[in-house]
Image (cartoon, rainbow, N blue to C red):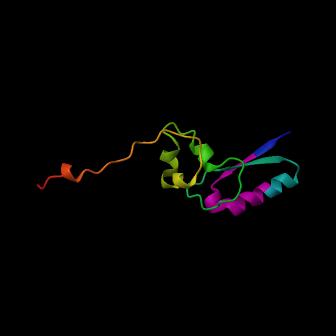
Amino acid sequence: MAKAYIVGTCDTKGAELRYMQKLIEATGVKTCLVDIGTSGRDGRAVDVSAADVAAHHPKGVGVVLGAMIVAVRLAPWPRPSPISYDPDAISAA
C-alpha cells in the first residue's frame, strides 16, 4: 500500500500539516508526518521528529537544533568538552 510523507515545519505549520494528513488519510492512504522545524514549539506527536532528522547531519544534531538540543532526548552524540575559566590566565593590557 502507498504511503504519503508529509514533511514540514510543525513548529509554524503544524495545524496545516495535520489538516493535510487528515485529508490524505481519509482517502485510505497511510501517512508519515515528518517534522523539520527547529524551534520545538509545536510539541505534538509526529512520526519522525526534527531531532531524528537532525541526527543525520554529518556534524551532529547540535549544529541543526542548537540551543533546542537541551530539551530533546536523543541517543548520546559527541559533545564538546566544557569551557573552563581561569581568571589567573587573564592579564591586564
Identify which residue is drawn at 51% across, 36% down: 58
Q: What's the magenta region?
A: 5-21
Locate residue 4, reporting x and y percent: 77, 45
Relative depth, front residue between 19 and 83: 83
Name the main secondary structure of what is drawn in magenta: helix
Residue 81 in the image, given as x and y percentages of width and height? 39, 42
Q: Is residue 51 left or right of residue 66?
A: right
The N terminus sits in image quarter: top right
Q: Quadrant of the C terminus?
A: bottom left
Q: Is residue 65 above or below residue 79?
A: below
14 or 87: nearer the viewer? 87
Q: How many numbered circles are shown?
A: 0
Q: Quadrant of residue 54?
A: top right
Residue pictured at 81% horizontal, 57% vertical: 22
Q: Is residue 74 left or right of residue 24?
A: left
How far across and down, in percent of the image, does residue 52 sit? 62, 44
In the rendered structure, does residue 11 fall within the stretch colored magenta?
yes
Left or right of 5 on screen, residue 55: left
The residue under the point 49% across, 46% down is 62
Q: Residue at x 51, y 47 (%)?
A: 64
Q: Is residue 18 above or below residue 84?
A: below
Which residue is most to the top? Answer: 58
